[in-house]
Image: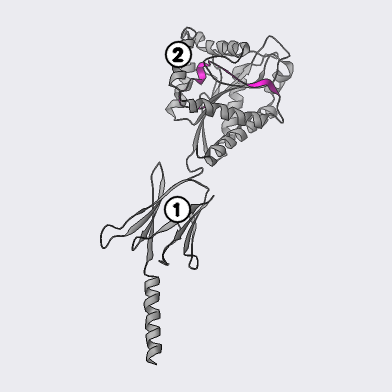
Amino acid sequence: MINLFKLTLLFIIYCNQAYSDELVNLRFGSNEEKKRIVLDLDKDLSFDHKTFDDKIQINFKQRIKINKNISAKDNLKSIHFDEKKNTLVLKFKKRIFKTNIYLLKKKKKHSFSRIVIDYSLQGSKKRIIIIDPGHGGKDSGAVGLYKNLEKNITLQVGLILKEKFNKETNFKVILTREKDIFLKLRNRTKIAKKNNADIFISLHADFNRNSRARGISLYTLSERASDKEAAALARRENRSDLIDGVDLSGESSEVTSILLDLTKRDTLNQSSLLVNFLIKAFKKEMNLLQRTHRYAGFAVLKSLDIPSVLVEMGYLSNKYDSKLLIDKNYQKKLSDKIVKAVIEYFNWKDKNNI
């Protein structure tokens, strides 16, 4: 009988020792930069952790028990503790973008040891997209074979893009113009910078002496043009400010050189990456110009730290493109492809932590 009592007492002592460590509380906090979960523990514990698409797994090295009053809230969908594996799983409502997990050791007798989880979720911050409908007001841009004006086509597509992007919860779209007004090129880039834009897309429709030329082309900023046609196009587009009495042509080469010296190489790489996703979205169902990605010194693309692409949606000098560019269904289809490309571009960046 005495031996049985001793065994029972030893078992109780063992259980108390085995489960002497406790996860006392879960606290939540956030600011504009990151979100935080703090696990309060009654003593310092060793652990390792793994991060999956939508959950964080914490594996404790010592036996632990969990306060039953702990519950999920904020961005947490559920909390699960596996007693056999001694593992805590925090499941989130959205995919996890980035984490930083570390231990703050106990400093005072009555304080807690803390496991701090700093994290951000995909889509938790809205991406700012600037859509720039080219030309406007007294600057009509190119005039098509059917007297269709470039400034009207770019605005129509810009408004469709805004409507489509706003249906996606992760984006906020700002148009440089929403009506038929004239804007200096430098003011268009100022709008992008003022709103801390993530990307800048300028919409245009080209005109060429060769009436057989047709298809979509995409341009990014470069000190040197990829070809004579790209250089000529840049000169035409940059003349927009001449209509308002501002001559940019004299400073173009020098300013472009300075800007390129200051521009982070990463920004130009990101612009090219966005072009790749646009080409991928377009190529199956849209007509593309040969050597679709071209580059030149476009004044409207000279935003130092914003990935920027100029989209030439087709040729108003070509009878087929000219008809398509005023067709509402084609404008919607074109807009769908741009939206798809932008979503895939940001998804790729999120996946690769860029």
Q: Position of residue 208 (x, y in %)?
A: 67, 11
| Residue at image point 40% right, 84% down | 8
Q: Residue furthest bottom?
A: 1
List x then y, in percent, for residue 142.
62, 13
In the image, residue 97 sits, relative to residue 18, either above or below, namely above
Q: Is residue 337 magenta?
A: no
Which dot marks residue 255? 2
Question: Of callouts 2 and 1, which one flags the residue occurring earlier in the amino acid sequence?
Answer: 1
Query: Residue 333 in the image: x percent, y percent?
Result: 67, 31
Q: Residue furthest front?
A: 3
Which amino acid type corresponds to the residue marked 1 in the rendered image?
Asp
Secondary structure beneath label 2: helix
Q: Which residue is mark 1?
A: 74
Circle 2: residue type: Val
Identify the residue shown where x is 66% and y is 27%.
331
Stretch in magenta: 287-307
Of marks 2 and 1, the one in the foreground: 2
Calculate the distance from the C-alpha at mark 2 to the C-alpha at mark 1.
48 Å
Q: Viewer-proximal residue, 23 or 92?
A: 23
Depth check, front residue: 153 or 24 = 24
Provide the secondary structure element on which disc 1 rests. Answer: loop
* Local crowd size for mark 1, using a 10 Å CA cut-off: few (<14), some (14–19), many (≥20): few
Q: Is residue 288 magenta?
A: yes
Count neighbours of disc 2 (C-alpha within 10 A) and say few if under 14, some if 14 to 19, many if 20 or more: some
The relative height of residue 16 versus residue 263 in the rendered view (above or below) is below
